[in-house]
Image (cartoon, helix red, strand yellow):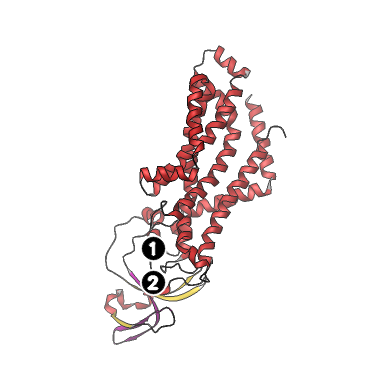
């Protein structure tokens, strides 16, 4: 039996490998996953939430270059490397975009960068503020690859860090939906009768409520925040899992291997978890891939409505909300870039789901 299972698994794997778009999409998902985990390592602005604001250089086009003067605060932060690389650096220094600078008699004179073609204000600072009087280490030629947002923050860094919410909400939501869906679907399908009728009544009521409306209601009940959105999305996606599990178990419990397990005196828990569920994982994998994509879209919609991840936390949906009016102001890329990122990730999960469906299709 195990050899047969292994051969079926290897056949499914071979079929999946032959699907170019499935393999390519899986590669895209893995790359985005790595970027989301190590976002602060790749981000040019590694401060917490990439929230370094420079209002004088707001809404600049991709490829914009400017000199940044960093004035050290002298405040030491007790932050370990793990926290810095995974949660962002607690930056206490002051960053100032400048147009020009000069040094005379130990004084650094600089002209602040001014937007809209105005002349910047000239200021000065004592060089003794810098360690070893080496001021050049504190002046950096910075390139904003994706430009800056309306608050003057590095847009590439916000995109990279914003991938965390969109990527991980899929895992959390699918995990919650699988736990609830497997439990409810297994009970309904295996025991039937009044248990089935009661669970189906709950499923039908949940199914009749629009998904986004139900998520909004749960989010408002739990409160606005990062984890609240994850839980709310997960609690609305269990219905489809439960319906599929119920249908699969209704047909599987009449199979001979289940009858044999009952004859051997196995309890219901063992029969369901050890014998039935392993044989219905194929459809669940496909549903989970589709639920990943749905969770990303729902979270983006919630962030766009302002009840998802809260500022200053970076989120692709919130970035579209902040900049959608720039579409008619001649800078559509501020809304299009996060929109394209959402589309790419959702499409990758959908293509992987389609490839898994074809690979696990026993009829072919």
Where residue 225 sits in the image (x, y, percent)?
37, 49
> Image point 55% across, 47% down: which residue?
293
Pair 2/1: label in front: 2
User: Does 59 lie within the magenta span?
Assistant: no
Where disc 2 sits, the SS reads helix
Q: Which residue is labeled 1 in the image?
A: 51
> Image point 31% across, 65% down: which residue?
92
Residue 136, labelled with which disc?
none
Q: Quadrant of the N terminus?
A: top right
Where residue 139 sits in the image (x, y, percent)?
39, 76
Front position in the image: 322 or 267: 322
Q: Is residue 19 visible?
A: yes
Q: What residue range appears in magenta?
A: 94-117
> Image point 42% across, 73% down: which residue?
57
Magenta segment, prevailing SS (helix, strand or loop): strand
Q: Which residue is labeled 2 in the image?
A: 55
- Note whether 202 is above or below 122 in the view shown: above
Q: Is residue 42 visible?
A: no
- Left or right: where 221 falls relative to 37: left
- Left or right: where 98 falls relative to 202: left
**How far is disc 2 from disc 1 in space, using C-alphas?**
12 Å
User: Does 96 lie within the magenta span?
Assistant: yes
Where residue 167 sits in the image (x, y, percent)?
49, 49
> Image point 56% across, 16% down: which residue?
261
User: Which residue reaches farthest right?
Assistant: 364
């Amino acid at each position: 039996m195990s050899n047969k299972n292994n051969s079926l698994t290897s056949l499914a794997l071979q079929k999946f490998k032959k699907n170019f778009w499935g393999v390519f999409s899986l590669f895209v998902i893995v790359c985005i996953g790595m970027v989301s985990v190590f976002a602060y390592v790749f981000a040019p602005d590694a401060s917490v939430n990439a929230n370094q604001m420079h209002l004088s250089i707001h809404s600049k086009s991709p490829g914009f270059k400017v000199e940044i003067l960093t004035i050290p605060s002298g405040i030491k932060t007790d932050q370990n490397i793990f926290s810095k690389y995974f949660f962002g650096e607690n930056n206490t220094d002051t960053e100032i975009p400048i147009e020009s600078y000069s040094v005379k008699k130990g004084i650094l004179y600089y002209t602040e960068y001014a937007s809209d073609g105005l002349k910047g204000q000239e200021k000065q600072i004592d060089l003794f503020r810098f360690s070893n009087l080496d001021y050049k280490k504190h002046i950096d030629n910075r390139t904003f690859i994706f430009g800056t947002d309306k608050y003057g923050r590095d847009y590439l860094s916000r995109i990279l860090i914003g991938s965390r919410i969109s990527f991980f909400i899929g895992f959390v939501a699918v995990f919650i939906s699988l736990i609830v869906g497997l439990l409810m679907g297994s009970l309904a399908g295996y025991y039937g009768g009044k248990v089935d009728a009661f669970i189906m009544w709950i499923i039908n009521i949940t199914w009749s409520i629009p998904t986004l409306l139900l998520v909004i209601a749960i989010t408002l009940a739990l409160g606005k925040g990062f984890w609240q959105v994850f839980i709310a999305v997960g609690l609305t996606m269990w219905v489809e899992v439960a319906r599929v599990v119920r249908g699969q178990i209704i047909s599987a419990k009449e199979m001979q291997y289940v009858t044999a397990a009952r004859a051997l005196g196995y309890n219901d828990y063992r029969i369901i978890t050890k014998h039935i569920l392993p044989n219905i994982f194929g459809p669940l994998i496909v549903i989970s891939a589709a639920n990943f994509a749905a969770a990303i879209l729902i979270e983006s919609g919630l962030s766009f409505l302002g009840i998802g991840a809260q500022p200053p936390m970076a989120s692709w949906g919130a970035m579209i909300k902040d900049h959608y009016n720039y579409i008619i102001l001649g800078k559509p890329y501020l809304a299009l870039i996060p929109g394209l990122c959402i589309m790419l990730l959702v499409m990758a999960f959908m293509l992987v789901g389609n490839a898994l469906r074809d690979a696990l299709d026993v009829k072919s």
